[in-house]
Image: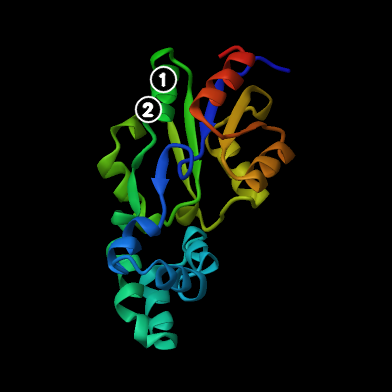
């Protein structure tokens, strides 16, 4: 294994606590079954990830409201109150990030995130300044696990995949990263991440 010289982080599930339930628990006022039905049948995960690939809420929300007018308030909230779905960051993982940054390790990020909502992160989390480069799926119209977004990341930031570590909590994304030559670590806990980095000389 080559000695790594940079680390690439995912955001959601690794550094950022994003979950639509953070918002809709409040809106459904304790009606858990109603909330889960809404997220499973109206604002589904398949609908949500279309925005990760570049679709705009201003285009998709009216269509969905037309299909489910009884849920209009909740559908519009998915766009207008998007920031409330971000509960915060994960301090233990952020501490790993800051430690690496403090030691001069080049850091990059590759995130599936709606391009129009990326400012929510930059406005709340100063640790984003630790990254030398961030590739946001919604801004480039590609999303993980598509291999093309990994190739774009490597090309844009001139990263040698043989000397980089990629961290993500989603197995499909980890597998895709390995497919383009990256040493990929599936994130579970900050403690396990520190151990994995130490094993690689970091």
Residue 97 lies in quadrant: top left
Q: Are marks 2 and 1 in contact (CB under 8 Å)?
A: yes
**Residue underneath mark 1:** 101
Residue 73 lies in quadrant: bottom left
Residue 153 numbered mark, or none? none
| Label 1 Cα neighbours within 10 Å, binned few <14 / some 14-19 / many ≥20 | some
Which residue is found at the position 52% from the left and 58% from the top? 141
**Sequence-first disc among 2 and 1:** 1
Could you say where residue 12 lies in the image, as x and y percent from the top left? 46, 45
Would residue 123 appear left or right of 16 to someone viewing this image? left
Could you say where residue 172 lies in the image, as x and y percent from the top left? 67, 48
Which residue is found at the position 35% from the left and 66% from the top? 78
**Residue underneath mark 2:** 130
Q: Nearer the viewer, residue 104 or 78?
A: 78
Secondary element at image label 1: helix
Cα separation between marks 2 and 1:
6 Å
Q: Is residue 91 above or below residue 83?
A: above
Could you say where residue 125 lies in the image, as x and y percent from the top left? 30, 37
State the quadrant of the N terminus.
Answer: top right
State the quadrant of the C terminus.
Answer: top right
Secondary element at image label 2: helix
Would residue 138 appear left or right of 148 to someone viewing this image? left
């Amino acid at each position: 294994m080559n000695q790594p010289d940079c680390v690439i982080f995912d955001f959601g599930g690794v550094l950022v606590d994003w979950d639509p339930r953070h918002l809709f628990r409040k809106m459904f006022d304790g009606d858990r079954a109603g909330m889960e039905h809404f997220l499973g049948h109206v604002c589904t995960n398949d609908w949500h990830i279309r925005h990760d690939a570049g679709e705009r809420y201003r285009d998709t929300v009216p269509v969905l409201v037309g299909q489910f007018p009884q849920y209009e308030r909740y559908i519009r909230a998915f766009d207008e109150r998007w920031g409330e779905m971000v509960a915060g960051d994960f301090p233990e993982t952020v501490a790993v990030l800051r430690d690496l940054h403090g030691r001069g390790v080049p850091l990059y990020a590759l995130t599936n995130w709606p391009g129009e909502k990326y400012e929510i992160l930059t406005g709340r989390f100063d640790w984003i300044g630790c990254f030398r480069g961030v590739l946001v799926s919604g801004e480039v119209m590609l999303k993980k696990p598509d291999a093309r977004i990994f190739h774009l990341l490597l090309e844009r930031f001139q990263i040698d995949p043989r000397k980089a570590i990629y961290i993500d909590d989603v197995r499909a994304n980890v597998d895709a990263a390995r497919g383009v030559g990256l040493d990929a670590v599936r994130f579970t806990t900050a403690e396990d991440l520190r151990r994995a980095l130490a094993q690689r000389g970091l």
